[in-house]
Image (cartoon, helix red, strand yellow):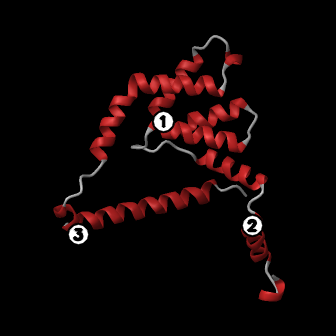
Amino acid sequence: MVAKQGRLTWSEFRTAVINKYGRSSIDMRDAAREQLERLVHQQGEAFNQFVDKFQQLRNQAEIQDEDCIVRYLIKALPEELANYTKYSLNTNSNKEEITVDLVANKITAIYNALFKDKWEREREKATPVTSSASILNNNSASKCLGYRSSLRGKCIRRRILHKRI
């Protein structure tokens, strides 16, 4: 490799090693932990997909502390669902029995009982119907692009603020 490219910088060397041998399990675990910390249920996202993604990241992150995982899960929920879940957990008589699986089951039950129909109706309303008239409407397209770019700026700022030093 050095013969082909001359001297390599550390980042070039690291990239070449990762490309050739893949990421280490430690790197993959750390990446999963970071994604788990930043995971948030997005409005319009199917709830079952969100729970599946959380469980997948939980398994990849290999975090043993149940309380930590429960906090990540509740933090990722929309505020109203999180409040109902916290209330349900606080009324639980035995705090020692609270596990991630128990909390996930409670969240799913609360979602199905109180929010499923409402959120699915909202998701259907939010899904735009594409027609030739809407494609030709440049004003709505520019508004959409402006909205997305402003969201991107917020996301970038949020990442910078929450980045660990």
Labelled pair 3, 1 in contact (Cβ < 8 Å): no
In the depicted structure, whether residue 84 falls above or below residue 1: above
Question: Can residue 151 be seen in the rendering of this structure?
Answer: yes
Q: What amino acid is at disc 1?
A: Asn
Mark 3–mark 1 distance (CA, rounded to whole Å): 35 Å
| 18 with respect to 122 (left or right) | right
- In the image, farthest residue toward the top: 93
Q: Secondary structure at mark 2?
A: helix
The quarter holding residue 163 reads bottom right
The quarter holding residue 119 reads top left
- The residue to which callout 1 is attached is 48
Question: Callout 2: 10 Å neighbours few (<14), some, many (20+)?
Answer: few
Instruction: Find residue 138 and name its label.
Output: 3
Mark 2–mark 1 distance (CA, rounded to whole Å): 33 Å
Q: What amino acid is at disc 3?
A: Asn
For the N terminus, which image quadrant?
bottom right
Q: Secondary structure at mark 3?
A: helix
Q: Earlier in the sequence, mark 3 or mark 1?
A: 1
At horizontal 64% and vertical 31% (from top left) the residue drawn is 70
Task: Please tell me which residue lies in front, 63 or 25.
Answer: 25
Camera-nearest label, 3 or 1: 1
In the depicted structure, whether residue 1 falls above or below residue 162: below
Mark 3–mark 2 distance (CA, rounded to whole Å): 44 Å
At horizontal 41% and vertical 64% (from top left) the residue drawn is 149
At horizontal 66% and vertical 35% (from top left) the residue drawn is 69
Residue 106, position in %: x, y? 54, 22
- The residue to which callout 2 is attached is 18
Q: Secondary structure at mark 1?
A: helix
Question: Can residue 6 be seen in the rendering of this structure?
Answer: no
Q: Earlier in the sequence, mark 3 or mark 2?
A: 2
Q: What amino acid is at disc 2?
A: Ile
Residue 4, position in %: x, y? 78, 88
